[in-house]
């Protein structure tokens, strides 16, 4: 939820609009690789659905609100998702410690987060 608030001097803050965004995203072809003491995560995201609702006390601007809702949907679909997929295609890298080895890593997508499960083996010979 995003809220736009205005405040004039000597007046109380006034809410102009509130934007609620709900989306469903699926992750596909996610892989995790270890190389050169780094973890690389690759994959792709699919936008299953997106709902944008703009709320305003000013009912006279209904057409502008509908236009804003459509613009936010289009921006999410045409700019944000392709940007994230571009980053995932290249691979997101994270530092890895040479004395920790990941065993059987698995990625699970849930409604509100992506979860990485793995067993970790501590290698005392590398310390």
Image: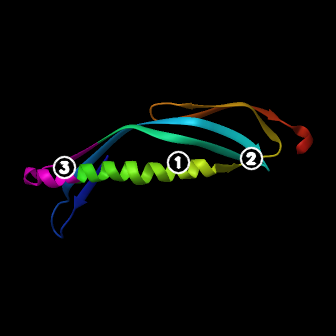
Is residue 5 at least partly visible in the picture?
Answer: yes
Nearest to N terminus: mark 1 or mark 3: 3
Which residue is denoted by mark 3 in the rendering?
66
Please, is residue 34 above or below residue 3 in the view?
A: above
Left or right: where does residue 60 sit relative to residue 116?
Answer: left
Q: Which residues are magenta?
A: 52-67
- Residue at horizontal 72%, vertical 41%? 33
Q: Is residue 57 magenta?
A: yes
Number of the front mark, 3 or 2: 3
Q: Is label 3 in a helix, a strand or a loop?
A: helix
Q: Position of residue 42 (x, y in %)?
A: 62, 43
Q: Tell me, yes or no, whether the two marked residues, 1 and 2, touch with CB atoms within 8 Å.
A: no
Number of marks:
3
Callout 2 crowding tier (Cα within 10 Å): few <14, some 14–19, many ≥20: some
- Image mark for residue 96: 2
Please, is residue 114 above or below residue 17 in the view?
A: above
Q: Is residue 28 magenta?
A: no
- Residue at horizontal 78%, vertical 49%? 37
Mark 1 vs mark 3, CA separation in Å: 28 Å
Left or right: where does residue 21 sit relative to residue 106?
Answer: left
Callout 3 crowding tier (Cα within 10 Å): few <14, some 14–19, many ≥20: few
Mark 1 vs mark 2, CA separation in Å: 23 Å
Q: Position of residue 92 (x, y in %)?
A: 62, 49
Q: Nearer the viewer, residue 64 or 89?
A: 89
Q: Residue furthest right?
A: 125
Q: Position of residue 14 (x, y in %)?
A: 18, 57
Callout 1 crowding tier (Cα within 10 Å): few <14, some 14–19, many ≥20: some
- Residue at horizontal 63%, vertical 49%? 91
Q: Is label 1 in a helix, a strand or a loop?
A: helix
Which residue is denoted by mark 1 in the rendering?
85
């Amino acid at each position: 939820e995003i809220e736009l608030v205005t405040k004039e001097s000597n007046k109380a803050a006034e809410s102009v609009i509130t934007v609620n965004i709900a989306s469903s995203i699926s992750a596909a072809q996610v892989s995790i690789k270890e190389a050169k003491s780094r973890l690389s995560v690759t994959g792709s995201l699919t936008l299953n659905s997106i709902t944008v609702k703009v709320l305003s006390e000013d009912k006279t601007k209904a057409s502008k609100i509908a236009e804003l809702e459509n613009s936010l949907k289009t921006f999410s679909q045409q700019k944000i998702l392709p940007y994230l997929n571009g980053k995932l295609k290249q691979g997101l890298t994270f530092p890895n410690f040479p004395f920790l080895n990941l065993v059987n890593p698995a990625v699970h997508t849930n409604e509100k987060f992506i979860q990485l499960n793995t067993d970790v083996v501590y290698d005392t010979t590398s310390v």
